Every structure is written in C-alpha cells, then in structure tokens.
Image (tube, coloured by chain):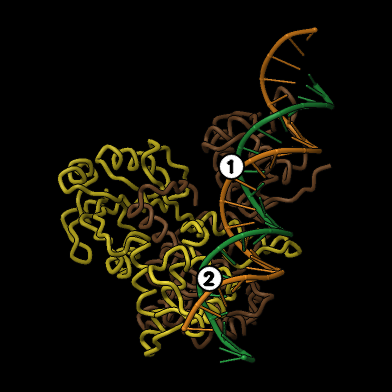
Chain colours: A brown, B yellow, C green, D orange
Amino acid sequence: MQERVLSIQGIKRLPYYLKFLKELKVNGVAYVPASAIADSLNIYEVQVRKDLAAISRQPGKPRVGFTVNALIEDIEHFLGYDNPNSAVLVGAGHLGQALMNYSELENHGLNIAAVFDVSPDLIGKSIRGVQVYALEELVNICRERNIEVGIITTPVGCAQEVCDKLVEGGVKAIWNFAHIYLHVPSRILVQNEDMAVSYALLSNHLANPMQEILTEE
Amino acid sequence: MQERVLSIQGIKRLPYYLKFLKELKVNGVAYVPASAIADSLNIYEVQVRKDLAAISRQPGKPRVGFTVNALIEDIEHFLGYDNPNSAVLVGAGHLGQALMNYSELENHGLNIAAVFDVSPDLIGKSIRGVQVYALEELVNICRERNIEVGIITTPVGCAQEVCDKLVEGGVKAIWNFAHIYLHVPSRILVQNEDMAVSYALLSNHLANPMQEILTEE
DNA sequence: TAGATTGTTAATCGATTAACAATC
DNA sequence: TAGATTGTTAATCGATTAACAATC
C-alpha cells in the first residue's frame, strides 16, 4: 500500500482543487474524474490522483471518479479548515486591511481576534468589527486570549521586533508578509508570503526569456 | 566546468541574499564568505556557493570570500532589476494600494504607468501620482504605452476577464494576486502570489503538527 | 606552510512522470 | 465483454547535501 503522504507542492495544489470542486458543487455535479481536475489546472492527471490518494478518505470509483462533496470535505479536513485558530494581525496598513477584508480566511477557520498598530488615529477604533490596540499590549493579549497565529503586515523595519513579541506571547505560527528572514525558535512555524520573492521570479523571467520557467509558483 | 544554471528555488533565495548584502554594504563591509550568508538564513553554505557560482561574474577568492558590491550588482543584474519594465495595475483596493506604496518595486525596475478600477470615485483621480482609468480603457492604454506587465489585484470574480484584456493589450507577463488559475496563451508568464495557498500551508501545519514542514515557502 | 575558503563531482533526497495492473 | 477510470510500482527529473580537490 502506498504511503499516505503529500508533498509540499501537493499541499499547494489543494486550494486550487478545492476551488474547482466548489464550482462543480454549485453547478450540481456529483462525481468528478481526476482527469477533469487536471485539465482545469493544466497538470497531469496522475499527479492529481497521487495527491487525492494521499488525502481522500474514500477511494475513487473506476468508471465514475470521486464524489465531489466527499472530496471537498477531505481537502478541507486535510488543510485543517475545520480546525479553528485564533490570530492577531500586526500592522493595519493597506496590506493588513486587505487581509481583514479577505473573508475566505474566516471561512477557513482563522479568526482574527485583535489588531495592533502604532498609529494613534487607529488605536481604540475598530476595523471590520475587530478592536485595534497599541503595540505595547501585544504580548499580554496574545497570552490572555491564547492566540495561536501572529500575522505580520508591518514595515520590514519592525518585523523582527514584532515577531519576538509574538513568540513571547506564545503563538505557534507566524504568517509573515514582510521581506525579512525572521529568526525564531525551531518549534515555531514561519510561513512567508513575500512579494519581493514573487517579483524576483517575474523580473528574472522577463530579463532572461530564453530560460524556461514554469508558470507555477 | 559547471553549468551556470540556477534552480527556481535558488532564484527565490536571491532576494534574501541581496537584502543581507545591502545591510553589509551599509555597515561598510567589503568582503563576505558564503558561510556568513548561509548563517544569516539558516541554510547550508554549499547551497549559497552553488547559487552564487551560477550568477556571479567574478569568482570568489579563497580566504577572502566574495566582494559585497560586485555580488549586489550581479544579483540585481541576474534578477533583471537593471532592466526596466512598464506595468499597469488593475484593482485599486487595499491590496492594490499596498503594492503602489511598495517602493522596492520601482527601485527594481517596475514602473506602474497606469491604474484601473471600476469605482467612479477613483476614476480620474490619481494614486501616488499615477492616474486611475476606467476598465474600458485597459486594452488601448496597454497597447499605446507598450505595457509589459499586468498586475491583477481585483476580486477573484473578474480576474480571468481582466487577464484576457491584458493579454489582448499585449502584456508579456501577469502578476496575479487573485486565487484563481488563469488561462493564458503559453507565451505569457503568469506569476501567482496567492494568499490562499500560503494560508493552506500554515493551516495544514497547525492541524497536523507531527508532519515536518520546513519554514521555507 | 597551514588553514580558510573556494568550486566541482558524486550521492542522496524529493517530486513528477511513465508504465501498467486492478476494478467496476 | 470492453473501456473508462482507478491506484501502484518503477523510472526520470530536479534540487540539495556530502565529499573532496584546488587555491590564495
């Protein structure tokens, strides 16, 4: 029997599978073969089958395919979307506010419990129903409310300092949008979302068009 | 002789090397060994050496290391930061405005020539000195000004439609921030920057802490 | 000279792709 | 039954890591 292990690249594909499956569901489609998922994303169907074999709790049926509803549930479960996490967001600039408006996060189990900023204009107000606090309160509020995830959308200059406070406050993971390599204890996961890295790939491709760089991230 | 080719993962590391090297330069450091770069990012020094071997135009010197200034120039050249590209940005919400404020992009050769939106409140105004136009003008302005890069920061619902217009307008690459797999002719590069993908990795890790997922993107 | 650091070649690891057997 | 689709095992490809020779 195959080991039920999914590659990191495979995990990255799951949100796209999920999006496609939800569209099928809305259109009332009950079953889907791996080939249809593969076609929608321009990848090989074997890859889809391997990914699904690692995460689906019921096997696909020959001549029929996979049950759309079951697959949606399995992917959501594997990605932990049924496992609520409490978070704080630090840095209420445009990027921070873009995240606050991204309702998918809430649907996927991420509850932003508090926002932090340095601007006196924002402190004490609320954004999308979430209170904005001064940075000084970060450690205490994280501890009191048992916060698991810290989101850093500050300027790069204070990102490490904010990160240290989040760690002190006891978070398990940091979602970092600043272009900096954060130093953290090894038990903490840092997930980087770095526009500078994404731009580097784009710029490099435009400067060296002979290189074959794939469209995937 | 080694082939001077850099892996995609290697390209993703370059912006971090660059950031570290610029800090050294500010501090007046003239030479740096690969081991110092590796230490700053918690990676193996052999990996740094391989990456640098692929992009540096002068070799490193035994007992001394690499020249900081030369390395900065070589990385910037390899990433195409000395190769200016003209761009348009579609979708002037929080995420779009965050990008407009990200001055690194301009320093790295990306000039945003025009912004597009559907909101009558924004059309005709300017953001950070860049004029906001109605979506109807997208194709024409791309053609007239020879735009090379289209940036999509719209809601997911209109992303494919905007993408089609950018392709019609003749862009070579699309920097896509919407959670959607864009269908484009094969000559066009799509660089995805997808928060939903990044979040999936984070959420999966929190739900299955036994899995060893690395901190790198 | 000895030692720090470089660059290269070979080995390992991880992910994708190909070939094929199993099943409804 | 034939054929569509599944899942698995083996082969290939790409990236990292280890071992080592070269140089100032």
Q: Quadrant of residue B96?
A: bottom left
In this view of the protein, which residue sits in the foreground, B70 or B135? Answer: B70
Residue located 73% across and 41% down the image = A53
Left or right, C12 with reference to B87: right
Q: Quadrant of residue A79?
A: bottom right
Q: Quadrant of residue A93?
A: bottom left
Give the percent coordinates (x, y) of residue B6: 48, 58
Mark 1 element type: helix
Circle 1 Cα neighbour tier, 10 Å, few/some/many (<14 / 14–19 / ≥20): some
Disc 1 marks which residue?
A17
Disc 1 sits on a residue from what chain?
A: A
| Residue type of the residue flagged with mark 1 | Tyr
Disc 2 marks which residue?
B48
Screen quadrant of the N terminus of chain A: top right
Mark 2 element type: helix
Nearer the camera: disc 2 or disc 1: 2
Left or right, B92 with reference to A191: left
Q: Disc number at residue A42?
A: none
**Visible in this render: residue B163?**
yes
